[in-house]
Image (spheres, helix red, strand yellow):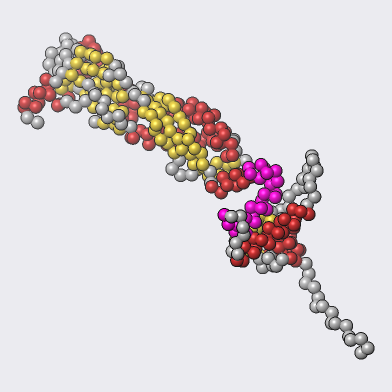
Amino acid sequence: MGLWSKLKHELIDIIEWPDVDSDLIVWKFPRYGNEIKNGAKLIVRESQVAIFVNEGELADVFPPGTYTLETKNLPILSTLQGWKYGFNSPFKAEVYFVTTRVFTNRKWGTPNAFYVEDPKYGAISLRAFGSYSFQVADAVKFFKEFSGPVEEYPVERITEELRNAIIANFQDAVSESGLSVTKLSANIRELQEVLLKYLQKEFNDYGLKILKFFINSITMPRELEEYMHKGAQAKFIGDVDAYQRVKMAEAYGNIGQSGNFVGGAEGLMGMAMMQMMMNQQTARPAAQPGAVPPPLSPQFYVAVNGQQVGPLTLEQIQQMIAKGQVNKNTYVWKPGLANWTPAQQVPEIAQLFGAAPPPPPPPPPPAGS
C-alpha cells in the first residue's frame, strides 16, 4: 500500500458496517494497521453490536447508536492503552460488528435414520425434518466463546453445530415421550413445544436465542406405514380377517387394474386362494352382537413358487395341502422359527398331512368264477 493510500485510510473517520451480506454473523471493520482517528464516528445500526478489541483482549462494547470516539466512551480501551490524559493521535484497535437480526428458515434434519423402542412394534427406525429461527442474544458471549477475532463469521459455521444439538435433543425427546410411533405425527405440536424449551438451554450456551422451532415431518419405514394404512382400512370395513384374506388374494392372484385376474400359474394360484377364502367366509357363522371373537390361530407363512404367502391359519394351510399347493417339502415360517423350515419339520403343520393310506384292495373276482 502506498503512502497516499495509507494516509487516506488514516483520515477515514467513520466506522460502520453496512451489513449488506445477510449470511454473516460477525464482520471485522477493515482499517490499515487497525488505526482509528481521534474523534472518529462510530455508527452502530439497529440489530448490531460493535466490539473493540485491543491486542486480542476484549475492550469496549457499543449497542446501536452513533458515537464520537473519545476517552470518556472508551474507558476500558483507555485503561488498556494507558491514556492518562486522553489521546490526540490515531490509536490502534480492532473493531468487530456482531449482528443480532433473526436468521429464519434454517433447516434441520436427521441425516441417518435413528431407532426408537416402540411398545407395540419394537425397534423402529425414524427420520425427521424441520426448520427453526434464531438470533444472537449475547454478542459478547458469542464473540468470546465461538467466533473470536475473525475477518468474517458466516452463519453456516454455527448452524452445523446447532443442527447436531437439535437432532440429539429431538431423539431424546421422542424416546422419553413414550409415545407409540403411530401417535408421533398426531402429537407434533406438543413435541415442538417441549423441544423449544430444551433447545433454549442449549442455545444459551452459544449466546444465542431460538425463536421458533418446527417439525415438518416424521417418517417411518414404508413397510410400517403401509401396514398401518391397511390396518386402518380393515378397521373401517369392520372385518380385519376378511380384509387380510382379500389383500392376500390380490397379492398372489395378480389382479390387474381392471380388477380381473390375469392368466398363468400365479393367476390360477390367486383364483384358487380367492375361492378358498370365499368358501371359508361363507361357511363362517355371523358374529353375534357383543360376542367375543375366538382367539386367532398361530400365523404361518409359506413359500409358493418363490413368493411369500401369508399370514395363514392352520385351516387355510390344510386346504392348500388338499389342493396340492403345499407339500411336506414346502418351506414355511412362523414367529419363533429362526429360518424357513420344511413343512414336515414343523409339528403343527406336519400333523396336517396324516399317515399315507395303504394300497387300494384288489378288485372283486368276477361273478360265478
Splitting the image into 4 quarters, where does residue 161 fall? Answer: top left
Q: Is residue 265 above or below residue 256?
A: below
The x and y percentages for residue 366 are: 89, 86
Residue 128 lies left or right of residue 346; in this view the side is left
Q: Residue furthest left?
A: 3
Q: Main secondary structure of the magenta part?
A: helix
Which residue is rendered at x = 56% and y = 32% of the image?
187
Q: Is residue 122 visible?
A: no
Splitting the image into 4 quarters, where does residue 235 fall? Answer: top right
The x and y percentages for residue 317 are: 71, 60
Which residue is rendered at x = 92% and y = 86% of the image?
367
The x and y percentages for residue 114 are: 50, 43
Residue 148 lies left or right of residue 185; in this view the side is left
Looking at the rendered structure, the number of numbered marks drawn on it comes to 0
Residue nearest the viewer, comparing 268 with 328: 268
Which residue is rendered at x = 39% and y = 31% of the image?
105
The x and y percentages for residue 234 are: 66, 45
Q: Residue furthest right?
A: 368
Q: Is residue 357 above or below residue 120?
A: below
> Is residue 254 a member of the stretch shown in magenta?
yes
Which range of residues does the magenta coloring cover?
232-257
Residue 155 lies left or right of residue 231; in this view the side is left
